Amino acid sequence: MLTLCLDIGGTKIAAGLVDPDGELIHCARRPTPNNAGAEEVWAVVADMVAAERAVAAGAVGAVGIAAAGPIDRHSGTVDPINIGCWRGFPLRDRVSAAVPGVPVRLGGDGVCMALGEHWRGAGRGARFLLGIVVSTGVGGGLVLDDAGYQGRTGNAGHVGHVVVDPDGQPCACGGRGCVETVAAGPSMVRWARAHGWVGTGARALARAASTGDAVAVQAFDRGATALAAMIVSVAAVCDLDRVVIGGGVAESGRVLFDPLRAALSCRTGLDFIRGLQVAPAELGSNAGLIGAAALVASTT
């Protein structure tokens, strides 16, 4: 049997079919409607679910959902920061009604990314894993003792809101000085432009850094330092053995990973943190779908 998987975020909605070995055998993506009502967004999800069921031809045995958060895994509702029209939206119940007779599991997109990389990507073989997505924001998820860890409500692993500068910039979460305010793509771009860089967008900033532009290099150094501070803190709490980093900003490669590893080497004083492995993600945009299938497998 196949698992029908959804990965729902503020930019795109993905749906796919994953086999028992973790292979994504079919996938479709559509943009998340902008400035739309709750039912308009749901209509896109419902259409995609119906299309995947048709492809599966009756072979769907379960549904896994990776959703932008916050979520409530007990009630099955979601309140995504980046889908403003979904407030207390009963996502799990809606999907259950659309795919009757099979179990439906809901998880945060961060923990599903981590589970996907743990199962089929750069996290294979790690028992204690932190998955991080560095993109428009900074998200994350934990795999502890080989199991996805969701916490009390399903929102464990929101590492983008670890505070690294108590007197720093205000964050969308309502806090101040979160990692996301320094290391997310738009945050690095804003800092660079405020310091004289004239380009636009995180990809352009990465290209500028790769050619030695001093301001762009410093922007990535700041972001990497903030990520390192957060990683060391989480590693100290959770006794991690590996960190896997994906997302658009992480695709800049050495521009991010070289200063990140240098910053980590200056901050890992504890013996049990010194061996921490940091690796680029391998599954790209498929990690959430594969992780949603892993979430089903781990809870059934």
Image (cartoon, helix red, strand yellow):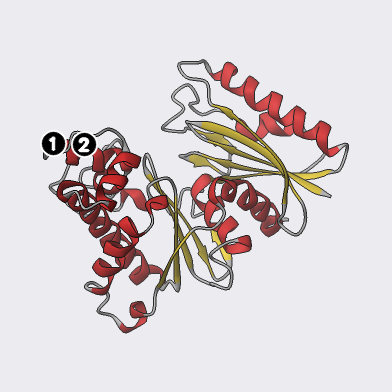
Label 2's element?
helix
Q: Which residue is mark 1?
A: 194
Which image quadrant is residue 282 in? Answer: bottom right
* Residue sitting nearer the eye, 70 or 277: 277
* Residue type highlighted by circle 1: Ala
The residue at the point 44 percent across, 24 percent down is: 84
Q: Which mark is residue 167?
A: none
Whether residue 67 can be seen here = yes
Which image quadrant is residue 95 in? Answer: top right
- Verify CB contact (< 8 Å) between mark 1 and mark 2: yes
Q: Position of residue 153 (x, y in %)?
A: 50, 47
Label 1's element?
helix
* Residue type highlighted by circle 2: Arg
Residue 188 sits above or below residue 227 on the image:
above
Q: How far apart, in angstroms, are the residues tagged by discs 1 and 2?
A: 6 Å
The residue at the point 43 percent across, 31 percent down is: 82
Q: Which residue is mark 2?
A: 190
Other residues around mark 2 within 10 Å, as few (<14) / some (14–19) / many (≥20): some
Residue 78 sits above or below residue 22 on the image:
above
Which image quadrant is residue 245 in? Answer: bottom left
Q: Position of residue 254 (x, y in %)?
A: 34, 60
Other residues around mark 1 within 10 Å, as few (<14) / some (14–19) / many (≥20): few
For the image, the number of numbered tags is 2
Q: Position of residue 296 (x, y in %)?
A: 69, 52
* Residue sitting nearer the eye, 203 or 295: 203
Q: Tell whether 227 sits left or right of 41.
A: left
